[in-house]
């Protein structure tokens, strides 16, 4: 912590938004009287972070899908290159000014102002840095639905390269960070103890003027459920649709609404319509950003994920937020329970709202970050990586994980997993490969 008092602390937050996390953290610091500013150099296409416009890269994604494909692909690649170059120039000019103006830094796990070259300088100048890993920015690519599905088309060479990059990113953060905040379920590359993401909290909160109480019963017995996938293929949307159809055939009266690819403001409006939400099928957390926002409206969530089996062993009960977190094959029954048991649904919605408005309010989360920057980290917040063994990843069913791992190890060897620091976890991963 710099010599300045906490009230005089000036915090730089950046440099790209993830589902409203960093804008919420900025708001939390303001709520507790600390000067902090979030610099978002890549506005989110869904309007998170107070940015309604799309970045250059986001605006040109459409070019991939329309003919002529060769011209479109070249235009897309050029736009991405120009956008990346412009962002690098902006951050290079931003760095000296930020080092003079700010006492401490909070950065996304994959965010750097000068490719990481600035980190030794920050340490020398006693500017503490907290890195926040949200999932994809540190999860091994061979355990991520994004890379697994890509590798089925283009092979495993790029996956091996991106695995090396992600591993090196984590090692760099471990070397220079005052603290690292990360989810245990995606922290396979971590070797040093880190702060549990669920203990730190998610400071995502809608405009309080927009949040209303749970609507009164409509009296027709129909329960409304909302699914709002940013990327349906990774959220298991087809599986969710089939699960809804299954419970309808059992006589459960349920109205299902799906909203995807819409601005964030439309998602918040839809939350007011729903009785509960269903988030995804292959999650590795019991409460991500969308579920956190739903909780502010008193709307409980059903979430599927293989990590539901590991959660009780790896996360203390008082750090586990309230949701109906179940294994993927238990999703239909979980939906039926939430739809038919009104008392349970309302009770869980109330508990979820209490959790996010008290424990995970922007002010409460920002207060924890002040402690992280000061090096005052309670032992109960910490995770010891050598105790982790989860290996089924995110955004993809188990069978696809097994096939991808088998192919990856066959192509690049066990050492390409980059798990030698955690033999127990490496064995868990290898146990998933086919003989």
Image: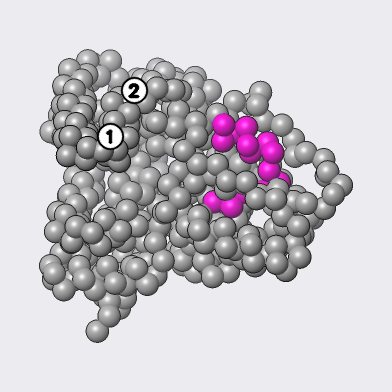
Is residue 277 one of those drawn in magenta? yes
Residue 364, can we see it? no
x%, y% of residue 380? Answer: 46, 53
x%, y% of residue 405? Answer: 26, 69
x%, y% of residue 240? Answer: 55, 58
Residue interval drawn in magenta: 266-279
Badge 2: few (under 14), some or many (20 or more) residues near its Cα, within 10 Å?
some
User: Who's the residue at 28% across and 34% down the image?
Assistant: 63
Label 1 element class: helix
Cα separation between marks 2 and 1: 28 Å
Position of 220 relative to 104 (above/below): below
**The N terminus lies in quadrant:** top left
Q: Which residue is mark 1?
A: 63
Of labels 2 and 1, earlier in sequence is 2
Viewer-closest of 74 and 430 = 74
User: Who's the residue at 17% across and 34% down the image?
Assistant: 71
Is residue 343 one of those drawn in magenta? no
**The C terminus lies in quadrant:** bottom left
Mark seen at residue 39: 2
Q: List the single residue furthest toward the front.
A: 68
Mark 2 touches mark 1? (CB < 8 Å): no
Label 2 element class: strand
Badge 1: few (under 14), some or many (20 or more) residues near its Cα, within 10 Å?
some
Residue 173, can we see it? yes
| Left or right of 268 on screen, residue 376 | left
| Left or right of 38 on screen, residue 328 | right
Viewer-closest of 164 and 79 = 79
User: Who's the residue at 26% across and 56% down the image?
Assistant: 150
């Amino acid at each position: 912590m710099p010599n300045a008092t906490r009230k005089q602390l000036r915090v730089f937050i950046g440099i790209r938004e993830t589902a409203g996390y960093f804008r919420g953290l900025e708001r939390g610091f303001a709520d507790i009287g600390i000067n902090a500013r979030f610099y978002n150099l890549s506005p989110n296409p869904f309007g998170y972070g107070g940015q309604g416009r799309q970045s250059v890269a986001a605006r040109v994604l459409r070019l991939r899908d329309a003919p002529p494909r060769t011209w479109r692909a070249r235009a897309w690649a050029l736009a991405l290159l120009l956008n990346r170059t412009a962002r690098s120039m902006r951050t290079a000019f931003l760095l000296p000014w930020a080092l003079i103006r700010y006492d401490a830094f909070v950065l996304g796990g994959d965010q750097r102002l000068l490719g990481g070259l600035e980190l030794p300088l920050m340490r020398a100048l006693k500017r503490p840095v907290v890195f926040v890993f949200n999932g994809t920015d540190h999860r091994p690519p061979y355990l991520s639905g994004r890379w697994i599905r890509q590798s089925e088309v283009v092979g495993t060479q790029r996956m091996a390269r991106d695995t090396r990059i992600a591993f090196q990113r984590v090692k760099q953060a471990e070397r220079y960070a005052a603290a690292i905040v990360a989810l245990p379920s995606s922290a396979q590359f971590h070797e040093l103890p880190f702060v549990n993401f669920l203990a730190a909290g998610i400071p995502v909160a809608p405009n309080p003027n927009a949040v209303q109480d749970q609507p009164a019963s409509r009296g027709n017995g129909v329960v409304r459920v909302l699914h709002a996938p940013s990327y349906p293929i990774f959220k298991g949307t087809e599986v969710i649709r089939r699960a809804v159809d299954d419970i309808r055939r059992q006589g459960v009266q349920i109205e299902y609404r799906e909203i995807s690819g819409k601005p964030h403001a439309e998602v918040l409006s839809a939350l007011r319509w729903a009785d509960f939400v269903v988030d995804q099928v292959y999650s590795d957390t019991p409460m991500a950003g969308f579920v956190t926002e739903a909780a502010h409206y008193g709307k409980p969530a059903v979430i599927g994920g293989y990590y539901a089996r590991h959660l009780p062993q790896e996360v203390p009960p008082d750090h586990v937020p309230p949701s109906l977190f179940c294994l993927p094959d238990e999703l239909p029954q979980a939906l039926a329970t939430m739809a038919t048991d009104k008392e349970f649904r309302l009770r869980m919605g109330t508990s979820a709202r209490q959790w996010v408005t008290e424990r995970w309010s922007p002010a409460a989360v920002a207060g924890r970050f002040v402690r992280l920057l000061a090096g005052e980290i309670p032992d109960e917040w910490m995770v010891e990586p050598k105790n982790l063994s989860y290996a089924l990843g995110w955004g993809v069913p188990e069978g696809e994980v097994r096939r991808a791992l088998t192919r990856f190890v066959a192509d690049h060897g066990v050492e390409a997993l980059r798990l030698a620091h955690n033999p127990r976890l490496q064995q868990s991963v290898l146990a998933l490969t086919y003989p």
